[in-house]
Amino acid sequence: MTILLDEFLSATYRGDTGFTGSLGFTGSQGFTGSQGFTGSQGIQGDVGFTGSQGIQGNIGFTGSQGIQGNIGFTGSQGIQGNIGFTGSQGIQGNIGFTGSQGIQGNIGFTGSGALGGSTVDAISSATATTTGINIFAAPATADQRYIIESIYLANIDEVVRTCSITIRTSGTGSDFSMINNIPIPVGSSIEVLKQFKVLEPSGRIRGTADANSAISASVSYTVLGDTSFFGNASTLGTTLADIYVAPSDRTVNSILLSNISNLDATADIQRTNGSNTVQNWFAKDIVVPANGSIELLVRPSFLANGFKLRGLSSDSNSVNVILSGKASL
């Protein structure tokens, strides 16, 4: 049955029972049911949102201080401990053994001569003269070798001076130029060697200057009772020819080219087998400047028994070649 609103109101007004029906208003306690709105304490469920303190769980992310654990990675400074391994640079000292580090490396090389009972305590000095003077003359003692570690020249005059240095590798050899008329400025000095040279008994190093009392020269050397060290010097011609034939396996530490003329010259140096078949070139048409010198080797090279060093120059009697080395073990 359908009751219209005005009928409902009049009916309610007319009957007290209908007023009792106002208990239906009491039914507004259904509004009390709005305590269901109190259920909006579900908003208090936002306290669950407080559960977003899980974000505080990000404090667990602060546990990313495990990244600070990378300080443990700083423990990779153990790699720096490899610097201790770098102490294996003592092995690099072996480079010194190869004499590859130049003069200083050669000291390491000659230091090995201590195995032969050598002494490493010698220096000889002189003031170069216009007629030439021995800066160092090796004694005639048999079975000795004199390892020339340094030839040092200093200008002690007040003007530019020139100086020449020659070497005689043995008592029976000739003098060969290492540097020729090299200018040394005022207040300056030069080191002649990049690699060691070897003198046999009665060999010598001489110095000549364009003025007396102008160039102070010194030779530092090591004495070895080891005849496996060798030195050799010659002059290149314009025809390819033998420079040195290895009587046994040899380590060659130095091939020095020196031009004694006032004009540039070119030179060829090659390694061959006993039949003159080229194995490799050390220099091909290399220009040796007028009055200049060139050290070809930075590291040692091997020359097998019976193998040769051969060479030529564009100008006869201008380019000297000076070798040094040691018999290989």
Image: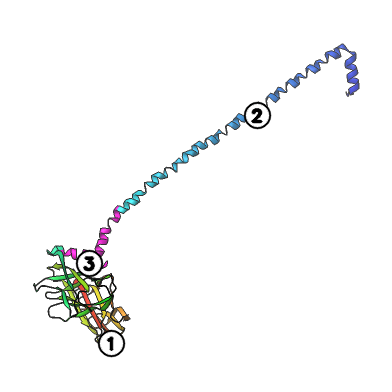
Kindly report the distance in space between the C-alpha atoms of the residues bearing marks 3 and 2: 88 Å
Q: Would residue 250 be seen by someone viewing this image from the given angle? A: no
Task: Give the residue type that dot 2 points to.
Answer: Ile
Q: Which residue is mark 1?
A: 315
Q: Which residue is mark 3?
A: 106
The mark total stands at: 3
Q: Main secondary structure of the magenta part?
A: helix
Q: Secondary structure at mark 2?
A: helix
Q: Are marks 3 and 1 in contact (CB under 8 Å)?
A: no
Q: Are marks 3 and 2 in contact (CB under 8 Å)?
A: no
Q: Nearer the viewer, residue 36 or 215?
A: 215
Residue 43 is marked as: 2
Q: Which part of the image, by quadrant, shows the N terminus?
A: top right
What are the residue bounds of the magenta stretch? 84-113
Task: Give the residue type that dot 3 points to.
Answer: Asn
Q: Earlier in the sequence, mark 3 or mark 2?
A: 2
Kindly report the distance in space between the C-alpha atoms of the residues bearing marks 1 and 2: 107 Å
Q: Which part of the image, by quadrant, shows the C terminus?
A: bottom left
Is disc 3 surrounded by few (<14), some (14 to 19) or many (20+) residues within 10 Å?
A: many
